[in-house]
Amino acid sequence: MKLYYRAKKPNGEEVTGIRDSADRFALARELRDQNLTVFFVSEDIRGASQQGRLSFINSLTKHISLKEKIIFIKNLGAMIGAGLSLIRTLSVLERQSGSGYLKKIIADLADKINSGQNLSSALASYPKVFSEILVSMTAVGEETGKLPETLKTVSEQLAKNYDLRRKVSGALIYPAIVIFAIIVIGILMMVYLVPSLTATFKDMKVALPFSTQAMIWLSDFFVNNLYYILGMMAVSFIAFGVCLRSATGRIILDRFILSLPFFGKITRWFNSAIIMRNVSSLVSSGVSMVKTIEITERVTQNHYYKKVMKEAFVKVQKGTSLSSIFNDNQNLFPVFVIELTAVGEETGKLPEMLLQGAFFYEEEVEQVTKNISSVIEPILMIVIGVAVGFFAVSMLGPMYSLSSAISK
């Protein structure tokens, strides 16, 4: 078949062309034998224009969702376990991938492996796409000859983390949407509905209750300063987003969440489950404890848990047990986590004990997030009812009194 290719010479000069070859991998080998570095091969001779368009799209959408990564890793392990060669597996996964950017990455992985690299080093060349946990466990799987099993373990771990994060965020989306809707509707009523009722009250020239006067004052404030209020809201929203992206902002937010009575407990369970599962997976795969702690610290998002894992990285090298480090931070780790870790270290079954703990707290978080909606929903209904009742008493009550007086 005719294949379009783009490559570079050792001096950096780019060359393009069309050649007959059995497949793109055979063409890549031929070009490498000629000391050319291949970075694009297309089965379509119109690949030049297609590749240019694809590069432009990829520059705008260089993002691969966690769900796509999980499916890729799971299928990769399953196909290798079924007996397919790594190169053929990547070729199949490239064809079935729906993401243009992921297709490009898989093709590049195949080229790197075809040139002599192993899978772990090829994955390591994309640190923003593939986590250190995946790279490290893949390397161990290659060394032990248990790559399919290792990839399955990684995909299951990522799937658990994904489900846990999705359930926690999903439980908070509903109340956030309701609160946002209440704010928007309230502003619209203050700007459009209340002024029309206010005009009626002024025409009647009657004494109004304090609640009605307060509502009218608030409406006048919104009407007279609407653009300033909207501008301040927009600035506050942007400032909040910028603050969250900064290190100081993240620290403040993490501390605030941990200090909350209800959500602080969920945050402790959530982070404990992720740390236990990561440590269990890495240690059971053969990664050293020091390296395991280093990797876990990098993938942990909460500042205070990252700080603990950084301390653990130093102390474990000096002989301190992981359970004693957790015990020194009981404000972050529940007693059950500390005891499981201690028992695991004493019995030599640390991965198994931590995995049990991870399952326990994942189920706890899942159960709590299921109950959040049922707990928050009546509270929101009460808030909405109070707001509607206050509006009715303040604005519609005087209207009813006026209409009754006029009819008499």
Image (spheres, helix red, strand yellow):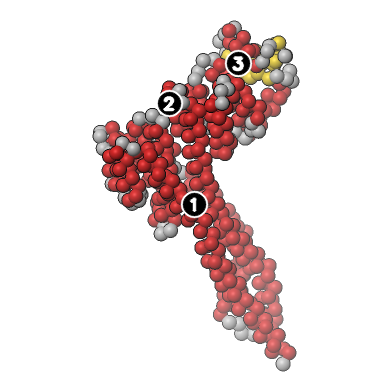
Going from N to C along the chain, the mark reached first, 3 or 2, is: 3
Label placed on residue 366: 1
Look at the image and tell me in which quarter the C terminus lies: bottom right
At 63% from the left edge and 19% from the top edge, which residue is drawn?
Answer: 40
Identify which amino acid the numbered label 1 is placed on.
Glu
Neighbour tally class for label 3: few under 14, some 14-19, many 20 plus, Cα within 10 Å:
many
Is residue 91 something that shows in the picture? Answer: yes
| Local SS, label 3 | strand
Residue 4: horizontal and vertical position, in percent?
69, 16
Q: Which residue ends up furthest to the top in the rendered image? A: 34
Q: Nearer the viewer, residue 197 or 231?
A: 197
- Residue at position x 45%, y 48% from top? 362
Residue contact at pointers 3 and 1, CB within 8 angstroms = no
| Closer to the camera in the image, 287 or 60 | 287
Amino acid type indicated by mark 2: Val
Q: Are marks 2 and 1 in contact (CB under 8 Å)?
A: no
Report the side of 369 relative to 255 (left or right). Answer: right
Q: What residue is pinned by disc 3?
A: 38
Instruction: Give the residue number, with chain letter if any, for mark 2.
Output: 140
Q: In this rendering, would 308 be left or right of 154?
A: left
